[in-house]
Amino acid sequence: MKLRLCLLVLSFAGLTAHAQLMQEKVSFTHADSLRGSLTPLRTCYDINYYHLDVKFNIPDKSISGSNQFKFTATQDFTQLQFDLFANLSVDKVVYKGKTIPYTRDANAVFVTFPQTITSGSKDEFTVYYSGKPTIALNAPWDGGVVFSKDSLGKPWLATACEGVGASIWWPNKDHLSDEVDSMMISISVPKGLKDVSNGRLRKVTELKDGYTRFDWFVRNPINNYDVVANIGDYVHFGDTYMGEKGKLDLDYWVLPASLEKAKKQFAANVKPMLKAFEYWFGPYPFYEDSYKLVETPHLGMEHQSATAYGNHFLNGYLGSDMSGTGWGLKWDYIVVHESGHEWFGNNITGKDLADMWIHESFTCYSESLFIDNNWGKKAGQEYNYGLRAGVSNDSPIVGVYNVNKEGSGDMYAKGAVFLNQVRTIINDDEKWRSILRGLGKTFYHKTVTYDDVVNYISTQSGINLLPVFDQYLHYKNLPTLEFATKGGKLQSRWIADAKDFTMPVQVRVKGGEYKFITPTTHFSPVAIEGATKDNIEIDKLNFYIGVLVD
């Protein structure tokens, strides 16, 4: 997903279904609803296949081409919606060899068919389009096409569109809930340049007009914002990794000046990353499409099987440690973080942008698991703890549904810290690992909801974690553990926003061993012998809470 600094996050004012409780107000437009909602004009068809065929006119900073939509009708209909930003022109829509009518409303396009498309039938249409796409000025934080040049003055382009949506540069059904099953990506570029997109390169064709077309085929389902064009004077080198599903092809595309640095940096980081993540999350989800790193003129993005890399072959995040602990300087942040998205974001994809935490919280957390796998559990916990410096607690992590609105940037650091806390509550690392791997297997290549993920973890752990997720994801405030002496005995309770909140927490008498207590929102005795409000201690390394001692 769109990369943000885990410490220096730019938080968005997210709301949730509980917005009325949070007393926050955000206005949304008709265009937001068209972009983010699932109306019958979108749910009436299930995308099976795209063939995106686009030519980049670099001097003019324009594009032209087509996208073929193959779909299965889920109900009878005569009209459907696809999406394309209004600054790009729909030149025509062709169905069975004939142009058919369409109308536009903001960035939504409504196509009317000459007869009813019947439920269960398979059909197709092709959209032809052209124009000057939005230029991304600060990718990946904004969306569009990056028009840049390499150190030798040769064109160097990339697309990045997470959040804003893929329809910023190509026509599609631009909603996270419907991933295309497979896709051909044909990108035509001026002769002498190369395009690197998702999946595997099928064919290179020299065209008569001085362009070269690169045909890439993606065998696995892919979400729209992952579809990418990377254009430059690339050179290629490769390797293989023997993983849980056999031999995985590793393909690296970089600028010639970067070749030697890339060989060293990728060798040091990629295989240790794959080993760690296959251990924790299960097999890399896209063996059929290979694993690729592509040098880009922007920092990085999790483009499925073609991860964008712009970290300048440095350890850390552009040479800095996100946690302030030193652990973040032992590995390349972009290689690890963006590759983590292959499991969370690309394999498991949220159905609505409001649940982008499913992508970012787990992936930010994957950084500490990478450290855990290479330097031990305590090192991973220390790194994770260090991420707290970047938490704002400004607004809920879950965003607003049906308007393409993600929640707070706290979905990164706070989400990672919270997931480590869930691991601590479960208190069984093998069970936690089986839950993480089970998520990848149960929801393999699927789109999911908040309830899908939270209910799975709660059920598999055998602990009712629903109030815990509710508090940390739907509310901006941390729960506060209050201690008070009543009747000569130390008692505790939770102060929280979530209904019927309860959560196990590790406490101890100073110098002793940590033990779990499970307070509710009503005072109850602390069942630890000798505990007083003066000597009680919280496991602050693993629990991110407020504490109040009366």
Image (cartoon, rainbow, N blue to C red):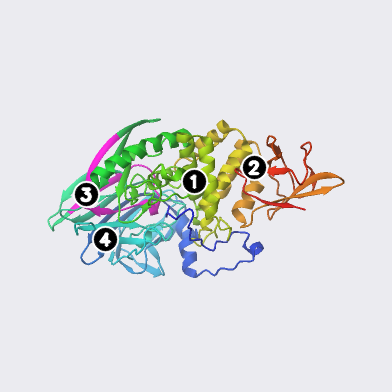
Q: Which residues are magenta?
A: 212-239
User: Looking at the picture, which amino acid does disc 2 mark?
Assistant: Asp
- Of circles 2 and 1, which is in front? 1
Any mark on residue 539, and which? Answer: 2
User: Looking at the picture, which amino acid does disc 4 mark?
Assistant: Ser
Whichever of callouts 1 and 4 sits on the residue coming sooner in the sequence is 4
- Considering depth in this image, is 156 or 443 the residue closer to the camera? 156
User: Looking at the picture, which amino acid does disc 1 mark?
Assistant: Thr
For the point 39% across and 35% down, the residue is 272
**Above-or-below relation of 303 to 282:** below
Any mark on residue 148, and which? Answer: 4
For the point 52% across and 51% down, the residue is 413
CB under 8 Å between discs 3 and 4: no
Whichever of callouts 2 and 4 sits on the residue coming sooner in the sequence is 4
Any mark on residue 325, and which? Answer: 1
Q: Position of residue 174 (x, y in %)?
A: 41, 57
Question: Under tag 2, what secondary structure?
Answer: loop
Question: Under tag 3, what secondary structure?
Answer: helix
